[in-house]
Amino acid sequence: MTQKKDALLYVGPATLFLFLVILVPLGFVAWTSLHTGDSWSFAAYTQLFESVLFRRTLWTTFEISILASLGSLLLGYPVALHLARVSARKRAIYMVLVLIPFWTSILVKSFAFTVLLGRSGMVNTFLSWLAGSPVEVPMLFNRLGVMVGMTNYLVPFVVFPVLASLLAIDRSLYQAAEIMGAKPPRIFFRITLPLSLPGVAAAVLSTTVMSMGFFVIPALLGGRQDVMLSNLVDFYTRETLDWNMASAIGVILLGIVTIAALGVDRLQKFGARPRTAAV
Amino acid sequence: MNDSTLLDPQARAYGNMRTVIVAIVLVFLLAPSLLVIPISFGGPGEITFPPRDFSWDLYRQLFTSADWVGAIMRSLRVAVLTMVIALLIGVPAAYGLVRYDFPGKKLVLLLVMSPILIPVIVISLGLYLYLSRLGAVGTVSGLVAAHVAYVTPFVMMTVMAGVKKLDPALEFASSIMGANRRTVFFKVVLPQLLPSIGAGALFAFLISFDEVVIAWFLTGASTTTLPVKMYSSIQWDISPVISAVSALLTFLSILFCCLSVWLQPSQRTE
């Protein structure tokens, strides 16, 4: 009995606070999405699925999220691999280099990219110098700008889980493979890659889920074709004051993310099982 | 293993290739954070890199603008309040969730961790609808409450990791020696947790200080925080002053990053 009372004393305040400040507002979103005027109705949802703007945005959100996630995997995997190979002391230094962008404000990065990727920005200046003639590649307010911004944000979220699963690989496997005469590519494809797959899967799914809710990067670095669901929520809430529609989009976004997160959870349990059994 | 790979020329070639790729990725990761520093010394003209001449003009402009200074002070106040409240509710909750079993524990854990999973735009919309009903949109207390809920899971993750490393025998021993529960928590548990609480505090402060989406929904014209001001400024009129703000934020991030690594040395080797 005292056990339970103690637990309540420790956990109670936070639980109550989050109930009032997270769960109740979520209830408001669900309630608002189902109320048009004074009565219950699915009008907002049917209206959304008939709207070309919503369907296009939904598609764009999926497309950008998946591409950004794969892009950051491509960039993050070699970094994780390198961190797993170097000595602990060097790894600490590299970790700081990955953590600095991780801790940097997304607004600072977005601002820096608007300067770097602009028409006469540093990247275009460099390309012009390489080409020997003026080059103006449009890199801002389009898909490329969004992808650059998003992968930059997501890479640390790939490095951490992949590094964890790379460090969990038994080193004697490498030694055995080398003694048997396996060359580096073979070692990579037969040992490193398959054994790091749980980390890779966790990284890809979690970065995809994270990307679904992105707001600042598509708003600041993207164009009109790169509007994502979050931006649409903002549009309906603040521009057209249609809280009904905004809430319905919020519920749909939450639904998508919840389903994906359940998938991540399943996958992690699935990935953890054979590994613990093997050890 | 390292010795044998050094002998094999093919392995060495792959190693070199990896180093080059990693260097390119790290430059890509760090460039936006670091380039704002030289840009911020470029003077009040057009934003360029590399800057044409060195000057403190942008910083002077920043600190003489009542608007910007007001936003910075407001963000500081919100971040400090958020940090304190999040620690007050998050640290005991983290301890309780690791040490005690009670019915509904999984649900409680899901609830307190949910702000990490739920898209921040949905949280912002919900709070906007909720607070506009209460007439609290645009108030500092509304924003602080929202930020506390948003950062508490990050505080709890850090502190829970710390509690898991504690030896329960110490708490047990002190209670056998006659210490009551309060003494055990304050004299035995808290002192050992200080590094993780410190790291959690850093997280709470910086996340709140940099947070833009919730603040974008919940602040009014007179309660604009620094990130909201930056956001609308980048979107509508890129004023060169932003580069000075950005450089200051980058310094803050580097400082916090180093502090967090110093506070949690175990994470470096794991």
Image (tube, helix red, strand yellow):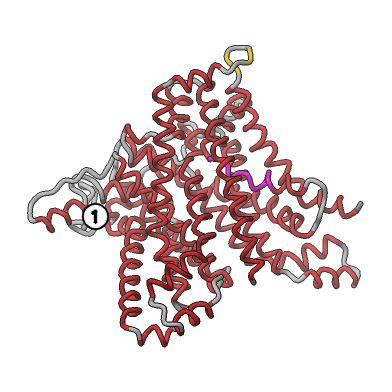
Choose top left, top right, bottom left or bottom right for residue A53. Answer: top left
Choose top left, top right, bottom left or bottom right for residue A231. Answer: top left
Q: Report if residue B61 lies within the magenta region.
A: no
Front residue of A42 and A35? A42
Q: Residue at x 44, y 66 (%)?
A: A80
Q: What residue type is labelled 1?
A: Gly
Q: Residue at x 48, y 22 (%)?
A: A48
Choose top left, top right, bottom left or bottom right for residue B184. Answer: bottom right
Does residue B191 appear left or right of residue B62 in this picture? right
Q: Report if residue B116 lies within the magenta region.
A: yes
SS label for mark 1: loop
Q: Can residue A50 be seen in this view?
A: yes
Q: Quadrant of the C terminus of chain A?
A: bottom right
Front residue of B206 and A94? A94
Q: Disc 1: which chain? A: B
Give the prevailing secondary structure in the magenta stretch: helix
| Residue furthest left in the image | A133
Q: Return the x and y of residue B235 as percentages of the image width and height.
A: 34, 37
Q: Mark 1 points at which residue?
A: B42
Does residue B49 appear left or right of residue B158 in this picture? left
Q: Return the x and y of residue B67 as percentages of the image width and height.
A: 40, 40
Q: Is residue B70 visible?
A: no
Q: Magenta region: which residues?
A: B110-119
Q: Return the x and y of residue A165 as percentages of the image width and height.
A: 54, 65
